[in-house]
Amino acid sequence: MFIQSYEIPSHVNKAFETFLTDTHDLFIIVMTLDLNYEIYHIDLDSSCPYLVGPILRYSNNFVQNEPFVAFHVRGSSSKEKINLNKKLIIFILHGDKLWAWYTKKGLELIEDNVSDLKYGNDDDLYYKVDYPENQIAEFKYRSKIKRIQT
């Protein structure tokens, strides 16, 4: 048995979660000592894989101090035999807010009242949205299941 280990930078307080794409890229989301989130990347197809990044860094204040819940990554197609020109996209759930990071656009809010992120494949992400409905001072919710196809 062989176990490979990767050093996480010393300014990192906690590694929250990893995500493995269909293109054999491993992404790690961490919280730093100065309360920033960072995402790192390891190309597992490389003959000598190593930690790269951060490829994305944003502050806890930017996501309104909402706690990290989950993330999903659509890997770049640049490593594929046929490059379909698919760019790297990262979806991040903080509290009940779904954010997306696009290579050229940056981080932007996609939707509120989101929960239950589910992986279909690199190109498909499913999630649930609860919409409040006010009916005579009693709040009820209507849920929808949504799919992002990238």
Image (cartoon, grey):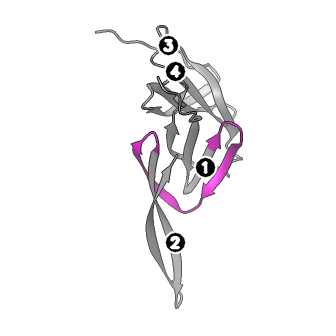
Q: Residue furthest left?
A: 1
Callout 1: few (<14), some (14-19), or many (20+) C-alpha neighbours within 10 Å?
some
State the count of labels: 4
**For the residues marked 3 and 1, what is the alpha-carbon distance in whole angstroms?**
28 Å
**For the residues marked 2 and 3, what is the alpha-carbon distance in whole angstroms?**
44 Å
First in sequence, mark 1 or 2: give its number: 1
Q: Which residue is mark 3?
A: 49
Label 2 sits on what residue type? Tyr
Which type of secondary structure does the marked residue at label 1 adopt? Answer: strand
**For the residues marked 4 and 2, what is the alpha-carbon distance in whole angstroms?**
38 Å
Q: Which residues are magenta?
A: 101-123
Q: Which residue is mark 4?
A: 42
Label 4 sits on what residue type? Ile
Q: Which residue is mark 2?
A: 131
On screen, residue 144 above or below 132:
above
Q: Which residue is mark 1?
A: 99
- Please report the residue visible at 58 percent of the width from the left and 61 percent of the height from the top: 112
Q: Nearer the viewer, residue 120 or 133?
A: 120
**For the residues marked 1 and 2, what is the alpha-carbon distance in whole angstroms?**
18 Å
Magenta segment includes 112: yes
Callout 4: few (<14), some (14-19), or many (20+) C-alpha neighbours within 10 Å?
some
The answer to the question of whether label 3 and label 4 lie on touching residues, with beta carbons closer than 8 A, is yes
First in sequence, mark 4 or 1: give its number: 4
The answer to the question of whether label 4 and label 2 lie on touching residues, with beta carbons closer than 8 A, is no
**For the residues marked 4 and 1, what is the alpha-carbon distance in whole angstroms?**
22 Å
Which type of secondary structure does the marked residue at label 2 adopt? Answer: strand
Picture coordinates of residue 56, whole percent (x, y):
65, 33
